[in-house]
Structure formats: structure tokens, C-alpha cells
Amino acid sequence: MKRGISFEIPNEYGTLLGEVLKPIDITVFSWRIGNGESYIVVDNELDEELFSEDKKAIGGAELKNLLENNMYYIIFSDLQAYPKGEFFDIETYEEFIESQCELILLVVDSCYVTIYSKNKETTELLYKNATECGFEDVKYITDENDTRIRLSAW
């Protein structure tokens, strides 16, 4: 069974998370912001954090605006999409499956992206988008090849 996808994005400034999530309507979700490190880029320099430390959740429209209308640099990112409602502390794939969370997006070391999705259509759209964007090493994550123990960027 397909759990999600993994691929590599360029290690550079840009709007890469916006590009990664482009095929889905991120505004219909509430997003839990996990531990991470990402910065807005101003005048080709790292500036304030993309996701402020005191904010653990963000609405989909606000996230879309952040990701599509700012230049930023991602070092680590941990985002979880929920239908409007409560958030859970998810650490394993099994907890993800049992939760209300619909999608988990992890970025590690600025370029390694992992996306878990409960929706098969969403997984296919994200896979197709990643290949069309020219991202490298695009693969499905399956029950057989998933080596991740924790669903966390840290």
C-alpha cells in the first residue's frame, strides 16, 4: 500500500513548499506546525522565521499566503494538515492512520521531503507534481520500503 511520497528539492531560497503543495487545496485544512527551522529571505539574507515559535497552528489560507508570497529557506519543516478541529501529537505512522490528520509534510536537511497522505488521489497528484517540477529521486513510500520510525523532521 502507498503511504506517501519522498523526493529531493533544491537546497536554495525560493517558494518550494508552495510548489510542493500546489496540486492540493491547502486552504481547506488547519495546519499544525511542528518543530522546524525555516526563514523568510529578505534582500538575499535570512531574516525572521517563516513560522513563529509561539504559533503552533495556522489556518490554510494564512499558510498558502506564507508559502506562495514569500521567498524563504527551509532547513527543517514539520507540517500536519487536519480538517478544521483539534490537533494530535503524532509520532508514528500507526498514530497518523488512527488520527484525524490527513497529510504530513516533513523536510529534513533543506532538501529531503517526505509526504504521508491518507488520500490516494492526493498522493498521486503530489507525485505527478513532484516529477513535473523536476524534483529529484521521486519515489512512493510503501509498507515495504518505509524505513522511517518517527514522523518528525527532528
Image (spheres, rainbow, N blue to C red):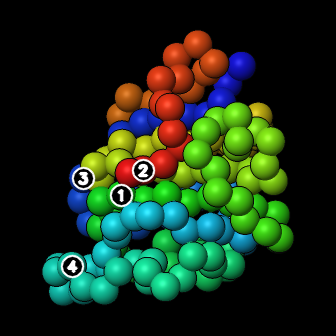
Q: Find the distance from the CA under tag 3 to the CA under tag 4.
A: 14 Å
Residue identifier under label 4: 46
The residue pinned by badge 1 equals 76
Residue kind at label 1, given as amino acid type: Phe
Evaluate if marks 2 and 3 touch, with contact meaning CB atoms under 8 Å apart: no
Residue 78, horizontal then vertical, whole percent: 49, 58
Q: Earlier in the sequence, mark 2 or mark 4?
A: 4
Task: Give the mark nearer the N terminus: 1 vs 2.
Answer: 1
Amino acid type, mark 3: Asn
Quick one: label 1, few (<14), some, or many (20+) residues within 10 Å?
many
Left or right: 12 in relation to 61: left
Q: Judge depth for marks 1 and 4 and give the one in front.
A: 1
Whichever of labels 3 and 1 marks the residue nearer the N terminus, that label is 3
- Sequence-wise, which precedes: disc 1 or disc 4? 4
Mark 4 crowd level (few <14, some 14–19, many ≥20, 10 Å Cα)? some
Q: Quadrant location of the N terminus?
A: top right
Q: Residue at x 31, y 75 (%)?
A: 39
> What residue is disc 3 on?
11
Is there a contact, CB below 8 Å, between mark 3 and mark 1? no
Kindly state the secondary structure of the residue where label 3 is placed.
Answer: loop
Q: Residue 119 in the image: x percent, y percent?
A: 78, 40
Does residue 113 appear in this view?
yes
Three-letter code for the amino acid on which mark 2 is drawn: Ala
**Disc 2 from disc 4: Cα separation:** 20 Å
Determine the secondary structure under disc 2: loop
- Nearer-N-terminus badge (2/3): 3
User: Does residue 69 appear in the picture of this structure?
Assistant: no
Q: CA distance from mark 1 to mark 2?
A: 6 Å
